[in-house]
Amino acid sequence: MTIRDPGAHPDFGDARPLDENLPELRRQVDQVPTDPGCYLWKDAKGEVIYVGKAKNLRARLRQYVTLQDDRDKIPLMMQVAHGFDYIVVGSEHEALVLERNLIAQYHPYFNVDFKDDKSYPYIAITESDVFPAIKYTRERHKKGTRYFGPYTDAHAARDTIDTLRKVVPICIATCAEWKRCRRELESHPDEAEVANIALAARKNRPCFDYHVGRGPGVCVGAISPDDYAVHVAQVEKFLRGQRSQIVGELNDEMRDAAESLEFERAARIKQRLQNLSALDVKQQVMFASSVSADLIGFYREETISAACVFVVREGRTVRSVEFILDKGADVDELELQAGFLKRYYDETADIPAEVDLSVDLPDAELLSEWLTEKRGHNCHLHRPQRGEKRHLLQMAEENAHHALARYMVRTGYADKRTNEALLQLESALALDAPPMRIECFDISTLHGNFTVASMVVFTNGRPDKSQYRRFKIRADLDEANDFASMSEVLGRRYAPERMADERFGSRPDLLVVDGGKPQLTAAIEQLDSLGLDIPVCGLAKSDEEVFVPWDDTPVVLPSGSASLYLIKQVRDESHRFAITFHRELRDKAMTVSVLDDVPGVGPKRKRAIMKRFGSMKRLRAASEQDIAAVPGVPDDVAHEVWQALRDWESEAAAARERMTEELDDQHAQPGAQDARDGGKKDGAAG
């Protein structure tokens, strides 16, 4: 079986239509046992493209080949998949552990993983040695070594080791004297129990760290293996965030030293306690109780995401770590969070009593059992709804957002994706060149009233808001008629005088209409009547299918591809731009008649009020006393005006909510014209 290069795409060129691919896969699935285990989907080259686990292998695989699994990636994955392997295990828990190992081995394209697959820094304790040492490392995890982390800030990891050795003296793995002692003890394993006596007899030179109090003197036999084991236990408690236990133990040692008149030793222990107390200034207290939890926030873009872990121990945030993931909105939120959780905790020994997430995972109980076994104590998954934990989880989500933004700027991710998208559209839509200027139109209406159209422009794959235009539809419509409205706006935009108008920019390389084949056909007919040959396509909202003039079968852009993301962004921006103009017109019409219905307000007083405040927005914000200050407006009339405005605001809010619901229902229909809010008015078309 081939191990896929991390970050490589499966061979989409060998994808087969579902009606050809699924029957053979179904026959294979019928032979699969009903035991628990793991399955590995493979492409035409035999490379593993997805790994999953199941309580019942046959039932789970059948969900794939019958398309009962409703995740967006499944149809594409079933076109690419040419077969599968499976491994039977004894329990669902064993399947979970095996799944994580297989993902780490094969790095499947469709599984959630870290974006750059780099090795993150860890703090490790070499527990298999007679005198374990602490070290900063990026190595692959080895048996006999305990790892704490990961840390995304290498400087923070090194600072932690430095501070820790001031609190609890322990050897560091880079020390030449410690390495020499380890070699000597490995060559004389029979001396392990009396190692300190054997090392003292050799009269070795003490290391520098021993002189400054950061090393316990292993090199000169100043500490026995049993006493050194106490130091190691304290270090591991420190790294797990159990500082209160260390403080108690050091206080006891300091008291014992003072009672034994060992004042120098007592002074050294006091200095260690002061070093430990200095951390209180750096670590923020988040909870009054001794909470041990990891709060994991996520932020997703279309095909990439970030996770931020706030590590809270004994009520204090001891560190935060951030990761970039290679999946985003192209996978289900539950799958994204579960995939990260398994990857993260598979590589760390620092497991808390509670893991807080923003969702309820379907296999939370199984994951809790796995974490409990790794931790040695209970660990459960929790979804905080309110309080400090919910607040801190939201902070983690905000930090994940910032982490993703920094990554995208640092790597030029957005530019790469945009270039990739334009090239993919050129190929998929058979264009002569990449569509450097894309125009998209959308219609927004409510039963034929306040009908408007938007035109948005993307230049070089980015929104070009200076080129946006919006139109009032002039046709007298008794009801919503998207075809007539679209024909009108295309006729106005691409009329000869507009094509020659510099304000409308250059000729588009691609025209996108929101809708299926009927909307596309109507747009082509309108362009033909104008004698224009502009590449055009339609994007259906229901299945995100792209309709083209030369084929009745829509083009399906791969889920998660840069091209699909770009064309959806163009469509959604036109949706956003149209609906605000529609709402502006609707709200303006509703406000004009407010003062006309107020008793005691005639044309003269209405002019005086509007002259004083200048706009309905300022008038609505005015107090009753402000209105009464207008010359010629008595107090009782001012009260009536103020009350009428309050009543209007309540009615407008209710009407806006009803209209929004109707618009959303309208745009949810296949082929309907979407719209949202936006900007610049077409001066000539108003």
Image (tube, helix red, strand yellow):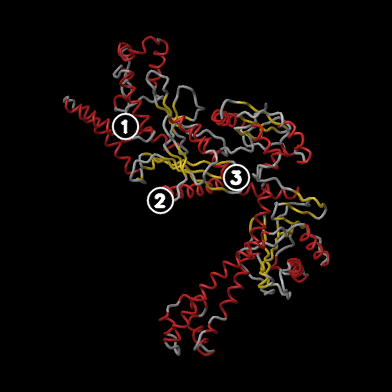
User: Residues at badges 2 and 1 in contact (C-beta under 8 Å)?
Assistant: no
Query: Spatial distance from mark 2 to mark 1, Cα to Cα?
Result: 36 Å
Q: Quadrant of the C terminus?
A: bottom right
Q: Quadrant of residue 234?
A: top left
Pick the front one: 292 or 267: 292
- Horizontal side, residue 279 vs residue 646: left or right: left
Q: Disc number at residue 387?
A: 2
- Horizontal side, residue 42 vs residue 142: left or right: right
Q: Quadrant of residue 5?
A: top right
SS assignment at label 3: loop
Looking at the picture, which amino acid does disc 3 mark?
Answer: Asp
For mark 3, does the 10 Å Cα neighbourhood hold few (<14), some (14 to 19), or many (20 or more) residues?
Answer: some
For mark 2, does the 10 Å Cα neighbourhood hold few (<14), some (14 to 19), or many (20 or more) residues?
Answer: few
Q: Disc number at residue 166?
A: 1
Seen from this angle, which residue lies furthest front?
Answer: 34
**Measured from the top left, where is residue 386 in percent x and y?**
43, 51
**Measured from the top left, where is residue 407 in percent x and y?**
54, 45
